[in-house]
Image (cartoon, helix red, strand yellow):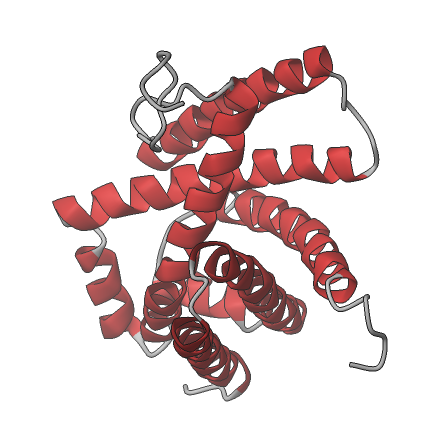
Amino acid sequence: MPGSDSRPFFLNLIKIRLPVTGVISIFHRISGVILFLAIPWFIYLFEMSLRGEREFNQVMLDLQQFWVKLFLIILLWSIVHHFYAGLRFLCTDFDLGLSKQQSRLTAWLVILLELVTFVMIMYGICV
Amino acid sequence: MSSPGLQGLRPWIIQRITAVFIAFVCVYFLVSFFSFESIDFEQWHQWVYSPFNTVLLSLFLIAVLWHAWVGVRDVILDYFPNVIIRLLLLSLVAGVLLASMLWGLRALLVVIS
């Protein structure tokens, strides 16, 4: 009966505490949607950059803007997360790492590899 | 609907095959970009329009758009139970993805300069 115990009888997304495997999963979805939304913009930049030297330099200049840079950083994170979380899901398709312990371990491994790769690429771009 | 009951299997497999291909190509792109000596138009243009890279980029584009289609389709089917809204959103997404493909392939295959 609603109200007779402390269980919530409505879905409060903020109060739900997801396990690390669930966090990986929902961010795989969120990063996927972000990447999808960026496709037309990426194609636009790609096409522009190939039109000529002037257009190429203009694209390079546009990418230096603060908000664009911020968006690019979010996109980079999205790609890196989608990559590693996706590899993990491919492994589960082959019945690899299905136990509770293993799946938690590989979820943390995804986060670790993701951070390392993200920092390495950011470092590679900045240097 | 030639194989009733299997409608979900084909997109599922396409999602996995394109995923593996995209993953490999991403690593190749990353290695290529970091081996560029400088970022200028000349080098970028030459890299994109070398025959190998043009073909690879075209295949990559098709794989990414196909992968995105299956993924976004799943997301829409999960969150929008209303048939009319589903149809509208799916049509919109399909339109954006097809337009993106034509635009991208045009830039790749119809060499402008």
Q: Which x, y percent locates residue A114?
A: 50, 27
Q: Residue furthest left?
A: A66
Task: Determine which quarter of the picture holds residue B63.
Answer: bottom right
Task: Determine which quarter of the picture holds residue B92.
Answer: bottom left
Question: Residue shown at 66%/52% (left/top)?
Answer: B19
In this rendering, the answer to whether A7 lies above or below B13 is above
Left or right: residue A102 compared with residue A51:
right
Question: Residue shown at 53%/34% (left/top)?
Answer: A25
Q: Which x, y percent locates residue B11?
A: 70, 64
Left or right: residue A97 compared with residue A81:
right
Q: Which x, y percent locates residue B42?
A: 40, 66
Q: How many marks?
A: 0
Quadrant location, the C terminus of chain B: bottom left
In this rendering, the answer to whether B41 lies above or below A4 is below
Q: Which x, y percent locates residue A26?
A: 47, 36
Quadrant location, the N terminus of chain B: bottom right
In this rendering, the answer to whether B15 lies above or below A111 is below
In this rendering, the answer to whether B82 lies above or below B39 is below
Near-viewer residue (A10 or A37): A10
Left or right: residue A90 compared with residue A117:
right
Question: Residue shown at 37%/69% (left/top)?
Answer: A40
Near-viewer residue (B51 or A41): A41
Near-viewer residue (B57 or A24): A24
Question: Residue shown at 32%/66% (left/top)?
Answer: A41
